[in-house]
Image (cartoon, coloured by chain):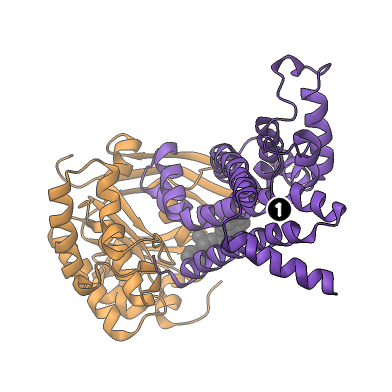
Chain colours: A orange, B purple
Amino acid sequence: MVKGPLSVSLDSVVVRRDGKLVLGPLDLDMETRGITVVLGPNGAGKTTFLKVLHGVERISDGEMHWSVANVQAREEQAYVFQSPIVLRRSVAQNLAYPLKLIGTVKSEISMRVSLWARKIGLEDALDFPATRLSGGEKQKLAIGRALIRMPKVLFLDEPCANLDGRSIREIEELLHEATLAGTSIIMTTHNLGQAKRLADSVLFLLGGRLHEQSPASVFFNIPSTSEAQSFLNGDIIE
Amino acid sequence: MNEIFAGLQEAFRLIFTLDSDLIEITLRSLQVSVTALLIASALALPLGTWLAIRRFRYRRFAIVVLNALMGLPPVVVGLMVYLLFSRSGPFGVMGLLFTPTAMIVAQVIIITPLIASITHQAMRELWSEYHDLLISLNTTSLQRITALIRDGRRTLMTASLAGFGRGIGEVGAIMIVGGNIDHVTRVLTTAIALETGKGDFALALGLGFVLIALTLLINFAIHSLSRTERDGTW
Ligand SMILES: Nc1ncnc2c1ncn2[C@@H]1O[C@H](COP(=O)(O)OP(=O)(O)O)[C@@H](O)[C@H]1O
Ligand SMILES: [Mg+2]
């Protein structure tokens, strides 16, 4: 375990796919702290950016460094994908899986599984097949399974897309609690209201490039670029 | 018409009196096909899974070859195995021609591509579902294959059963390499062919019923496996 928050620096990072520029060039220094919300219109490169940070998206050019070795950084991170991936197993086995992989002892696993099942409101569904949960329940399961290893950094890609109000509130509570327990969060969202409720700082992406990096209070009140201003006004930007 | 009816009656009598020939032939059929199934599964399940998750240069080609092998006419497989095991063939010294072992070899060759191909398709689907998560969790190759085989075990059983169904109902290849020798290599399908040729419909029908029952059993099993898979109940 590493003491203190992780930080990351990107040096002219570029991602190209099929000859098309998807992200970058991106220069950025960031200390992960509280909740960082990545904002930007559809296709801005938010998902690609998150995957690059997590080290699961191949970089075409440039370099990225975490404050610890990249392998170790990945071990301290967890990622919840845009559409939640659940294993074809029971709820309990889904929660247990990341712990099993790292050889956690059985008693510890069962203790943490029941703890997290309670936190995500699925304590009565431990033996229920995870593939038959509702969308909101699957998302909560994916978040619980991501947090069960108590990562230093949690990536979330649109965690509340297509969810009802109650699920959104429960998930936001989970995320808030996680930050109190020492997990930093980097997430994307389409929901400006959610960004305002959760964000400590904001990264604003547009056309694959970083247009703004500010504390939330600054970004939402006095955005420094006209594009961010239009985005906040709900104008269509390209 | 009368002849067939009498044959049916006699067939039921053979089954319900547990006729010793009928039992012996059925057991030999099971012995050959179950052994072939076990060997073929041990080869095909890991191979199909490996093909699904591993990217290598000739992967596409390997899959095409696999699908082509699946369409091999069993009679031709029988001929090839015959040539390999015949006295002048490369494995002639082993003296395996006209033994159950040669029949097992032929069946393994026939059903391995089928099982591997079904496995490959199912595992590719599951892998695309799991891919991002397993990468994100920093899993080793072994952990990935384990997770896929564990969570895809129902489809894998379906694949194996399909292979078994093909093996036990196959007649061309095992007729050639087994020779349909009484008390040695006679199995359900070859016996049916022989008895029908001789005009002894009773035993042929009795054996036919056993074969149909086995096939139905396999298909019910496949059906219920794929249903539980779809409903996510396990
Ligand atoms: N593998 C890929 N091949 C080609 N284009 C891609 C690929 N992945 C993403 N893109 C393109 O890159 C852009 C950014 O995608 P993405 O990161 O998903 O944006 P966002 O999450 O902000 O909507 C989009 O225009 C998308 O079409
Ligand atoms: Mg996205």
Question: Total label count?
Answer: 1
Name the residue furthest top.
B93
Query: Residue extending furthest bottom?
Result: A165
Q: Going 64% across and 52% down the picture, which residue do you hit?
A: B22
> Quick one: B62 or B130, which is closer to the camera?
B62
Q: Is residue B108 left or right of residue A94?
A: right
Residue A137 visible in image: yes
Which of the 4 quarters of the picture holds residue A144?
bottom left
Q: Residue at x 69, y 60 (%)?
A: B206
Give the quarter of the figure containing the C terminus of chain B.
bottom left
Location of residue B23 with respect to B219 vertically, above or below? above
- The percent position of residue B141, horizontal first and vertical second, equals 44, 38
Q: Residues within 10 Å of mark 1 (few under 14, many from 20)?
A: some
Rendered-image quadrant of the N terminus of chain B:
bottom right
Instruction: Say whether residue A27 is visible.
Output: no
SS at circle 1: loop
**In the depicted structure, whether residue A142 falls above or below residue B130:** below
Residue located 42% across and 44% down the image: B146
**Which residue occupies the foreground of this view, B204 or B128?**
B204
Residue B133 locus on image (x, y percent): 41, 53
Question: In the depicted view, which residue is nearer to us: A90 or A200?
Answer: A90
Left or right: residue B162 compared with residue A144:
right
Which amino acid lies under the numbered mark 1 shown in the image of this protein? Answer: Gly
- Residue A129 placement: quadrant: bottom left
Q: Position of residue A81 (x, y in %)?
A: 41, 61
Q: Which residue is mark 1?
A: B169
Left or right: residue B41 compared with residue A221:
right
Give the image location of residue A88, x and y in percent: 41, 61
Q: Ligand 1 within 8 A of label 1's CB? A: no
Parent chain of label 1: B
Residue lying at 48% horizontally and 58% vertically, measured from the top left: B154
